[in-house]
Image: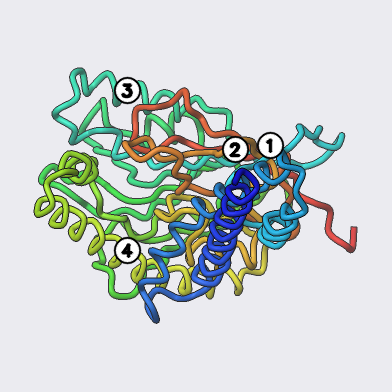
Amino acid sequence: MAATFKKIRRRVWLILNTLVVLWMVVGVLCVQVPPSTFWPAGFIAMSLPGALVFNLLFLIYWLLRRSWLLVLPLSALMLGWEYYGRLLAINFENEVPEGAKTLQVLSFNTHIFNAYNKIVEGVPQVSNDMVDWVATHPADVFCLQEFYSRVNSVEFNNFNRIGTRYGKYKFASTSVGDRIKADLGIVIFSKYPIVQGNTIRFQNTPERSANRAAWADIDVEGDTVRVYAVHLQSMSIKSEDIENTYSAIGDEESFKKESRNVARRLKGGFIARDNQVQQLLEHIRESPYPVIVCGDFNDIPFSYTYHQLAKELGNAFVEAGNGVGATYNGPLPFLRIDNQFYSPGLKPYAFETHYEMGLSDHFPISATYVLEPKATE
């Protein structure tokens, strides 16, 4: 009887493990499918982290059982190794080569420095703390999304407080946004001269939309690096939407309504970012200089958007970061939706997610790059 039960249990676990491997395979395939062609692929791709984790648990289970069946999850792990690297980064600290030319880049969705957040007690102090933190950060280049500045305000004159006061060069891609003529958008600050810059306005996106990309050619002591600051289409999901969905569990009708609302917004975001990343990549391919592409991509590492960028560019977190690198400061944990990508000619030696700055709905990220000598040098 015991032997029969053991055989049945083994067969059940094998079937479950096989289903997880199939889940992984389908998820990996869906990561490569444009949502504009088949939008359900975006939802399946989002579930890929679950398959990766379950496959790892099966590997441990078969290992503890000392069963040859560990070959199944082990093979899946090896085939999906790239995706495990996107889930969890493990890197040892490398010393920057002596005499190397470096560039430290900070990227931060500042959430308009909470200028409109009337709910938070002590908003002026919160905003001041955020601005001061950014202004005094030792980075060489700052890529700020959802930037906000008002010329006639001591508190919110952030072009001055972050840039002019510290002698930084800037390229601003902003629109006049409210009744008091504030500038909102993307701004690139640099301690090195900005040779030129421009805006990439995404198709089918309103001209004043915050979703855009800005680029600037920066002269780093004789070498030029093109830096992109990107803000792709938002998921358009607020904290209240997630909380409402959680609270609706148990109420079938309410849960269906809230779930459909979230799913509809996710679908729209998948399709919009599909088009935006293609337009962005077309511009990147034409760059005559090494590029750093950073910002708020509003998509996880198991998305079509991320995959398209990762096919052509390295990712600083994967190569130099550690842990899960979550950048979303909201009710959904472990989401890494802010990234820094880079092209050949650059090498990241350090990456940090700044959890000490938790006043926005995103955590800032910074990376230090070494500009590799040109082949002719």
Check disc 3: other Cα within 10 Å, few if <14, some if 14-19, many if 20+.
some
* The label number, if any, that marks residue 269 in the structure image: 4
Give the image location of residue 313, x and y in percent. 64, 61
Element on which disc 3 rests: helix
Q: Nearer the viewer, mark 3 or mark 4?
A: 4
350, above or below 40, in the image = above
* The label number, if any, that marks residue 350 in the structure image: 1
Q: Amino acid at mark 2?
A: Asp
Q: Residue at x 61, y 51 (%)?
A: 4
Name which of mark 3 and mark 4 comes first in the sequence.
3
Element on which disc 1 rests: strand
Q: Is residue 222 left or right of residue 284?
A: right
Q: Is residue 120 left or right of residue 139?
A: left
The residue tagged 3 is 128
Q: Residue at x 61, y 73 (%)?
A: 285
Q: Amino acid at mark 4?
A: Gly
Name which of mark 2 and mark 4 comes first in the sequence.
2
Label 1 close to label 2 by CB (< 8 Å):
no
The residue tagged 2 is 140
Q: Amino acid at mark 3?
A: Asn
Name which of mark 3 and mark 1 comes first in the sequence.
3
Label 3 close to label 1 by CB (< 8 Å):
no
Q: Nearer the viewer, mark 1 or mark 2?
A: 1
Q: Nearer the viewer, mark 1 or mark 4?
A: 4
